[in-house]
Amino acid sequence: MAPAITTLAADAPELSAANTGFMLICSALVMLMTPALAFFYGGMVRVKSTLNMLMMSFISLGIVTILWVLFGFSLAFGTDSGSLIGWSSEYVGLSGIGITELWDGYTIPVYVFAVFQLMFAIITPALISGALADRVKFTAWALFITLWVTIVYFPVAHWVWGAGGWLFEMGVIDFAGGTAVHINAGAAALGVILVIGKRVGFKKDPMRPHSLPLVMLGAGLLWFGWFGFNAGSWLGNDDGVGAVMFVNTQVATAAAMLAWLAYEKIRHGSFTTLGAASGAVAGLVAITPSGGAVSPLGAIAVGAIAGLLCAMAVGLKYKFGYDDSLDVVGVHLVGGVAGSLLVGLFATGGVQSDAKGLFYGGGLEQLGKQAIGVFAVLAYSLIASAILALIIDKTMGMRVSEDDEVSGIDQVEHAETAYDFSGAGGGITGRSTSVATPVLSENKKVDA
């Protein structure tokens, strides 16, 4: 995220129609990422959990939007208080902002900055949902989102991006959300799953993705939306930094996908579509904090390293026994940590700031700053999220019953199913013919 700029009155910026339009487009791209994530996660679960997985992402669009307008923007980007939180009364309800009022030192209106940041706030809790597939009450999840963004996301966003935030002032580099979004969400996912436990049949029953085409569609839309996520985080492109970030986003994602597939081929003997999609997302995660600090060659290194580390990390849940359903910890936490720390090695000092990494003569100073940012956010989010999940679990219950989980959370929580096979191959009466029977049988087999 671009740093705050202090200007003299005589040098005060004027509204730029070009930058304003660019940022509105970027905001729309980031909004698209949440439905894209829903498709990505929705295809990875079993048939009986598809709609619930889609809804766990989609509901964030509603809840977080209202909270952001009421008080979230004020907490995250209001006047600093003690380097830990912000607050500005004119931001409450977005009611005290002039329509032409510019964001701090930039050429875009405050409203545009607020809506761009809103889209980040929406997708971050949605990322957590992938770790909780198949087993969480929808009402409990909605309450968790409400509490989590208020207690965890809004303060952490201020630490990392708000003027006066302690990580911001320390000089931790996080261009577009390696700490505030991905480490934050990944650590939260780990905290919650340690509280609520494993799915019924974990490590015993097959839990394969029911629709790999949906997974690939979601991954492709995430890749597309991520250009707005990353390039837009410079809040304009008058100096070319956003263009560098755009290029690095593409380069790192490609490198990560290839690295994941190479590992998969060597380790398991096949190139899979799930591996390609997961590798691409790992690269997107890793370049998010680092892409404004590295060169395209550095982006290749960041992507390849992250792709390899994340591919190795997704298997740790079987070794250590935590049920991270859709590898949120393995991809977002590990990828976010890798991308954030690699800034301390590959930062050139010639793009977003003059901070240099170890390989460019900067010594260990920036790496140390990055490590502080990484582990501060990781620890806070992990502990706070586990406490929130524990409170909800002890009061209203976080999980559906075992019987409901086995029979299918879609029908129990939403009174719907993702696919209607009742008329498959049927005639005028809608009765299924024998041709459809194998389809139904196979579907039941996948759901088992």
Image: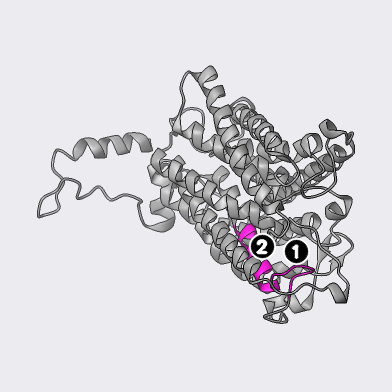
Q: Which amino acid, by three-letter code, is at mark 1? A: Ala
- Residue 128 located left or right of residue 403: right
Can you say whether 80 is above or below 348 in the image?
A: below
> What residue did someone put label 2 on?
117
Quick one: 169 or 159, which is closer to the camera?
A: 169
- Residue 126 located left or right of residue 364: left
Q: Can residue 403 be seen?
A: no
User: Where residue 355 appears, x then y in whole percent?
Assistant: 85, 44
Q: What stretch is highlighted in magenta?
A: 102-122
Q: What kind of secondary structure does the magenta stretch mostly adopt?
A: helix
Q: Residue, x 63% and y 62% (percent of image)?
A: 146
- As helix, strand or loop, the secondary structure at mark 2 comes to helix
Can you say whether 257 is above or below 403 in the image?
A: above
User: Where residue 308 appears, x then y in whole percent?
Assistant: 62, 28
Residue 69 appears in which quarter of the rendering?
Answer: bottom right
Q: Which of marks 1 and 2 is in front?
A: 2
User: Where residue 378 appears, x then y in whole percent?
Assistant: 75, 44
Q: Residue, x 72% and y 43% (percent of image)?
A: 290
Measure how far apart labels 1 and 2 are at the Cα level: 9 Å
Magenta highlight on residue 117: yes
- As helix, strand or loop, the secondary structure at mark 1 comes to helix
Magenta highlight on residue 278: no
Q: Which amino acid, by three-letter code, is at mark 2? A: Gln
Q: Residue, x 73% and y 82% (percent of image)?
A: 96
Crowd tier of the residue under label 1, counting other residues whose Cα lies within 10 Å: few below 14, some 14–19, many 20 or above: many
> What residue did someone put label 1 on?
76
- Residue 318 located left or right of residue 371: left
User: Where residue 7 appears, x then y in whole percent?
Assistant: 86, 69
